[in-house]
Structure formats: structure tokens, C-alpha cells
Image: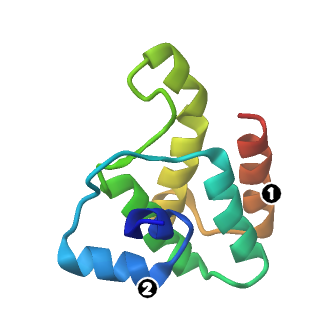
Amino acid sequence: MTSFEEALAGNMTTIQLLKSLHKQAESEIIVMPKNIESILQMYLLGERSASELKDWAGFILSSEGYVCPNWDIDELTDRYEPMWEILQQLAMPEIHGQLSSQKIETYLQTLASI
């Protein structure tokens, strides 16, 4: 598993290290709804804080290597647009509101439908 895959899996120590080194992925890392579902479940279980979710989502969005499957075919990537919107909302709680269990459940339902 590469450092960027570890970061996608929610390893906050790896994220901090990659940020401090200003490192970019050398290859594409596919982001799937299950990746977001996994970290949202960690939040619900108390294994991640709202602040960590914000940092994680911000890192995924700001790192060039993270892409959805078939990212280069518009008709296919449209399917994953709700996933990226959820990441944006997680990264910007100041705009989209603080997390709640109800909001997380809505996100999980949306991700399950992708």
C-alpha cells in the first residue's frame, strides 16, 4: 500500500507527513464510494473526529492523484459527482454546516446509491 493509499484509508499520520513534505502522488489513486463510507463509519464509531474528517477530505480534494474510475470519460464520471460533493462538504463545514449523525447517514445513503 502506498502512502497515498494509506491516506485514502484514513491514516491521519500519513496525511500529515505527506502534507509536510508537499508530496504529490506519482500515479492515479482511484477513489470509490466505499473509501468515503469507510471513514464516515469511523466517525460514527468515534474513531475519527469532525476535524479529522475535514482534514482528510481536504487532503483528498487538494491532491492531484485522486481520481474516480474512468475519470477521463465525462459520461462515466458524472455518476461519481455526488461522491465529490460529499468530500467538498466534509472539507468545508464552515460553509456546509457541522456534521451530525443524520447528515452522515444521508451521506452514506447517497454513497450506497452510486
Amino acid type assigned to the residue bearing label 2 in the image: Thr
Few, some or many residues within 10 Å of mark 1 (<14, 14–19, 20+)? some
Few, some or many residues within 10 Å of mark 2 (<14, 14–19, 20+)? few
57 horizontally vs 22: left or right = right
Q: In this view of the protein, can residue 92 be seen by the observer?
A: no
Q: Which residue is painted at 47% across and 80% down in the image?
A: 12
Residue 5 tag number: none
Distance of mark 1 from mark 2, alpha carbons? 26 Å
96 horizontally vs 29: left or right = right
| Quadrant in which the C terminus appears | top right
1 horizontally vs 109: left or right = left
Please, what secondary structure does the residue beneath circle 2 have? helix
Toward the viewer: 41 or 92?
A: 41
Residue where numbered disc 2 is placed: 13
Q: Position of residue 64 (x, y in %)?
A: 29, 49
Q: Are marks 1 and 2 in contact (CB under 8 Å)?
A: no
Q: Position of residue 18 (x, y in %)?
A: 29, 74
Amino acid type assigned to the residue bearing label 1 in the image: Glu
Q: In this view of the protein, can residue 25 be seen by the observer?
A: yes
Residue where numbered disc 1 is placed: 105
